[in-house]
Amino acid sequence: PNGTLSAPTANAERTVWTATLTPTANANAPTNTIRVNLAGVTDDAGNTGTGSAISANYSVDTRTDSTGLTATITLADTALSAGETTTVT
């Protein structure tokens, strides 16, 4: 629900397949993975894969507004007199 994968394309040796992930617009999802069911994959010799492969976690944040955005501002000294300075983090 947080993106769409393009059809995979193979390198010249057909050992690496690449697909492009296009994230869904206006989505915010910190936990996502891509899973491949290897039982639906066959090699050039007709051997069927087994099990599945799963990607590492990735996040999607394509919000176009400020929803969910926050900032924390910290002052090293909150009681200043004229001419004094402080560090703002």
Image (cartoon, rainbow, N blue to C red):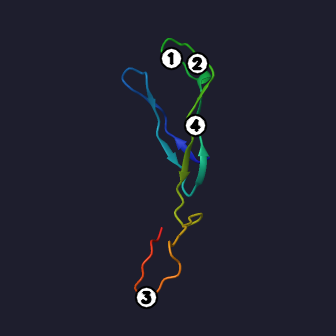
Q: Residue furthest top?
A: 45
Q: Is residue 84 above or below residue 2?
A: below
Q: Residue furthest bottom?
A: 82
Q: Which residue is mark 1?
A: 43
Badge 4, how many Cα within 10 Å: few under 14, some, many 20+?
few
Residue type marked 4: Ile
| SS under mark 3 | loop
Q: Which residue is mark 3?
A: 82
Q: CA distance from mark 1 to mark 3?
A: 75 Å
Q: CA distance from mark 4 to mark 3?
A: 57 Å
Q: Which residue is mark 2?
A: 49
Residue type marked 3: Ala
Mark found first going from the N terminus, 4 or 1: 4
Image position, residue 77 (x, y; %): 50, 75
Residue type marked 2: Gly
Q: CA distance from mark 2 to mark 1?
A: 8 Å
The residue depicted at 45 percent of the width and 71 percent of the height is: 87
| SS under mark 1 | loop
